[in-house]
Image (tube, helix red, strand yellow):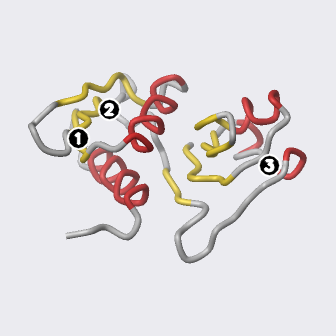
Amino acid sequence: MSMSDPISDLLTRIRNASSARHHTVDIPESTLKREIVKVLLRERFIARYVRIRDGKQGLIRVYLRYTEEGTGVIDGLERVSRPGRRLYYGTTEIPRVLNGLGTMILTTPAGIVTDRQARKLHIGGEPLCIVW
């Protein structure tokens, strides 16, 4: 079965696993999803990830991070630009997420980057999601 929005599926799987206090979540692999997970790792929203080869599409096993109190590091994930409503931001139009406490992940000509990296590189792009 084909999926109309694989990025929303990725975000929903992570959101559901975090709210259910699971330590890992398996996601069907694609290059875009792998790049998003790399950004989540770099920004310390997840502990690590592992690529699992299964002879088909492959999987990404994401290890979620929790605080010492047991609450998830990821408080929220939200899809911004969707297949039904594409958004694009120029360099000066990229908004700050929760006054800098959250992170926006964008796809740009320089690849998948955070809002801070896009401002530093002076490039705009399509916002994929926000994480806080």
Q: Which of 13 and 73 is in front in this view?
A: 13
Q: Position of residue 102 (x, y in %)?
A: 64, 40
Q: Label 3, label 2: how many angstroms apart (C-alpha)?
A: 27 Å
Q: Where is residue 105 in the image (x, y as percent from the top left)?
A: 60, 43
State the residue lying farthest toward the right: 92
Residue type at numbered disc 3: Ile
Q: Which residue is painted at 56% across and 52% down in the image?
A: 129
Q: What element carries label 1?
A: strand
Q: Position of residue 117 (x, y in %)?
A: 72, 29
Mark 1 or mark 2, which is nearer the start of the sequence?
1
Q: Which residue is painted at 78% across and 46% down in the image?
A: 124
Is 14 situated above or below 23? below
Whether pointer 3 and pointer 2 mark residues with C-beta atoms closer than 8 Å, the reply is no
Residue 25 bears which disc, if any?
A: 1
Residue 116 lies left or right of residue 74; in this view the side is right
2 or 1: mark nearer the eye: 1
Question: Which residue is disc 3 drawn over?
Answer: 94
Q: What element carries label 2?
A: strand
Residue 82 lies left or right of residue 65; in this view the side is right
Q: In which quarter of the image is residue 115?
A: top right
Mark 3 or mark 1, which is nearer the start of the sequence?
1
Question: Which residue is disc 2 drawn over?
Answer: 64
3 or 2: mark nearer the eye: 3
Density class for disc 2 (Cα within 10 Å; few <14, some 14-19, many ≥20) is many
Q: Position of residue 100 (x, y in %)?
A: 74, 37
Is 130 situated above or below 110? below
Q: Nearer the viewer, residue 120 or 131?
A: 120
Residue type at numbered disc 2: Leu
Residue type at numbered disc 1: Val
State the residue lying farthest toward the bottom: 84
Mark 2 or mark 3, which is nearer the start of the sequence?
2
